[in-house]
Amino acid sequence: MARESKSNTSPIDIDGLQQLMELMEKHEVSEVKIQEGETKYVLRRGAQYVAGPTAPVHFATATAAAPTPAASAAPAVSAAPSSAEDSGLIEIKSPTVGTFYKAPTPEEPAFVNVGDQVNPKTTVCIVEAMKVFNQIPAGISGTIEKILLVDGDTVEFGQPMFLVKP
């Protein structure tokens, strides 16, 4: 990370931060500490980290690598059922870590509801990571049988979000 300038602009180089997070994800590094003069930065990824009273003054939590553009945010699809009652259903899994939202805004209707038909390009939800809202396509055709999360839930990479009957 580098400072952009000594003026009142942001002391964080966002592009450098995103590159560092990508490297952390690629090499499965969970924590990086950087000190620049008297300013300290701690980057952590993973749900097990929560900022507490002992967190450094300049604290940034990286819960994911740089978000992927919506066009390439293809969710993982699994035919493995999560329980006996769900046999024959396919899971739509999160392609990234972030916060789950079933609608574009709180005032708008959900992208999909139980019983809705979807195709591979149907947007089923948004996963927000670092203020980037990634629209998640279904990736498969079928009928939404279950929505496994509610708005504001934290979602992990590969976590099932929906169950679809093909």
Image (cartoon, grey):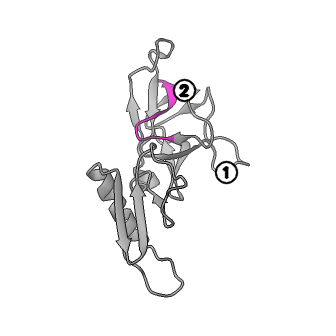
| Residue 118 falls left or right of residue 63 | right
Seen in the picture, residue 28 relative to 117 is either above or below; the reply is below
Mark 2 or mark 1, which has the lower sequence index?
A: 1
Q: Which residue lies under the disc numbered 1?
A: 105
Magenta residues span 155-166
Please tell me which residue lies in front, 149 or 39: 39
State the residue at coordinates (53%, 42%).
Answer: 154
Q: Residue lying furthest front in this view?
A: 54
Find the residue positioned furthest to the top: 84
Q: Which kind of residue does numbered mark 1 sit on?
A: Thr
Q: Which residue is mark 2?
A: 143
Judged from the image, the secondary structure of the residue bearing numbered disc 1 is: loop
Q: Foreground: 155 or 30?
A: 30
Q: How many marks?
A: 2
Q: Is residue 123 visible?
A: no
- 2 or 140, nearer to the observer: 2
Instruction: Residue 158: name its quadrant.
Output: top left
Cα separation, mark 2 vs mark 1, equals 23 Å
Outermost right residue? 107
Look at label 2 and name its amino acid. Answer: Thr
Q: Position of residue 34 (x, y in %)?
A: 35, 67
Q: Is residue 48 visible?
A: yes
Say above or below: 54 vs 101.
Answer: below
- Examine the image and state in which quarter residue 69 appears: bottom left
Identity of the residue drawn at 43% across and 52% down? 71
Say few, some or many: other residues with alpha carbon within 10 Å of mark 1 (under 14 / 14 to 19 / 20 or more). few
Is 16 on the left-hand or right-hand side of 164? Answer: left
Give percent across and percent down for residue 101.
Answer: 59, 44
In the picture, the quarter occupied by the N terminus is: bottom left
Residue 145 pos. (x, y %): 56, 24
